Image (cartoon, rainbow, N blue to C red):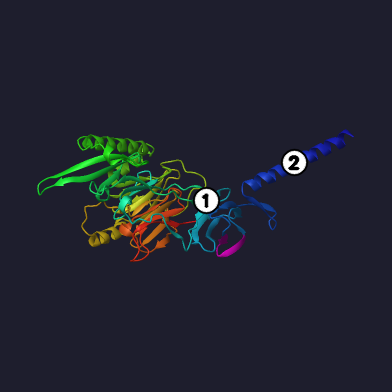
Amino acid sequence: MVRKRLIIFLSVFLGIALVAYFLVKLASGYRPDFSTKTMRPTGLLVATSTPNQASILVNGKILKAKTATTLSLGPGEYNIEIKKDGFSSWKKKILIEKELVAKTDAYLFPTYPDLKALTSASASNPVISPDGKKIVFAVADQDEKNGLWVLDLPERPLGLTREPRQVLQSAPKGRDFAKANYQWTPDSKQILVTLVKSATKTKVIEENFLIDANNLNQATNLIDVTDQLPAIKKEWENEEKILQEAKLGKLPEELLGILGKSAKDIFFSPDETKILYTATASATIPKELIPPLPGASNQTESRDINPRKIYIYDLKEDRNFYIMSEQESKRVKEQEKKEEKISTLPLSSSPALSWFPTSKHIFLVQKDKISIIEYDGTNKVDVYSGPFENSFAFPFPSGNKILVLTSLSKETPVNLYSISLK
């Protein structure tokens, strides 16, 4: 009886151990191979997309599963494609390694985005705030609507946007704020408005006002800060310098030294995990500046940087990707400068290359076209083709829409429009 109980106990214990071993192997990416009667090592591909429930193709073969799902694949390179009707397709070659997890994180953009007017009173000279959440613009020839207006970009529930609000009203026989130059303060809470008070051949006298961006400012209560302006701007420069130095302090010391000598125009992604920069001299970024992460991106990188080339460095995965040449990003701007009429009004053109709110994409503004590119240089998608004024185009903070300044026809006034990306 004792021997029988011992055999049963050992059998149960062995069975539990085998099941536990099997489950651990399954969790590690191993799958049973009945032909060899062994556990075959595999890797996992987490196929996700925005929007969800998109089709998955592996090496050209469409699967029954939809995103989001996890696929078990043998080690090796695979051509992965994710597509959905009405959206751009996503393609990438992904390396699957045994016992490691790779992800797609595919972002699909609509093939035919919706265009919706956000203003109706002939908007002009829009300027985006430093935090990317507000737009100030001028309105002229609209009677009591003349002056400066502010539009908040963060969306309400159900994707609704807020109505513009007037922050300065031009007087019929007084100051015409629609003709002013204006810029945001670094904290995006105020706007510096500059008007020409008087002008001669030898001297221009200006008046400068700091106004609240959230309320209507009475013209009679404005205070001229022209005398304090040099000190105010110096304080702004110091604030921006402190913020930039705090961000740069997160970089590996060796990389910081390379960028200090061989790069310019360094811009951090919104989540501060990546940097977009332009190389000014040849250099080599050493490998393993940061301990490598399991399952990191396996896309082709460029550790050797060359002058007049634009790159992105991933601070989390220690990867450096080539994006495009500086000339490619400036070609459109140079053409627009030739066509631009001389004006004393503020320029509203957006930078040709900037970060998209996802921190995984780059926003490229071209002539009559807007494109979005993944941070590793793959999957370039043209999300809008059509005319827009002064190359003014910016993504909403949510990444769900793009803001452009355009007119639908020669008969309609120029206004701010949103382009839906979802």
Which of the two labelled residues, at mark 1 and mark 2, occupies the earlier sequence position?
2
Residue at the spot x=80%, y=41% of the render?
11
Q: Can you tell which quarter of the image residue 404 is in?
A: bottom left
Height in image: 221 above or below 196?
A: above
Name which residue type carries label 2.
Ile
Front residue of this view, candidates 115 and 165 = 165
Asked whether 226 falls inside the magenta stretch, the response is no
Residue 91 percent across, percent down from the top left: 49, 60
Asked whether 60 falls inside the magenta stretch, the response is yes
Residue linked to disc 1: 158
Query: What is the magenta range?
Result: 55-64
Residue linked to disc 2: 16
The quarter in which the N terminus is drawn is top right
Q: Taken as a whole, is the magenta stretch helix, strand or loop?
A: strand
- Which residue is most to the top? 2
- Which residue is most to the bottom? 410
Q: Describe residue 301's horizontal placement relative to residue 27 as left or right.
A: left
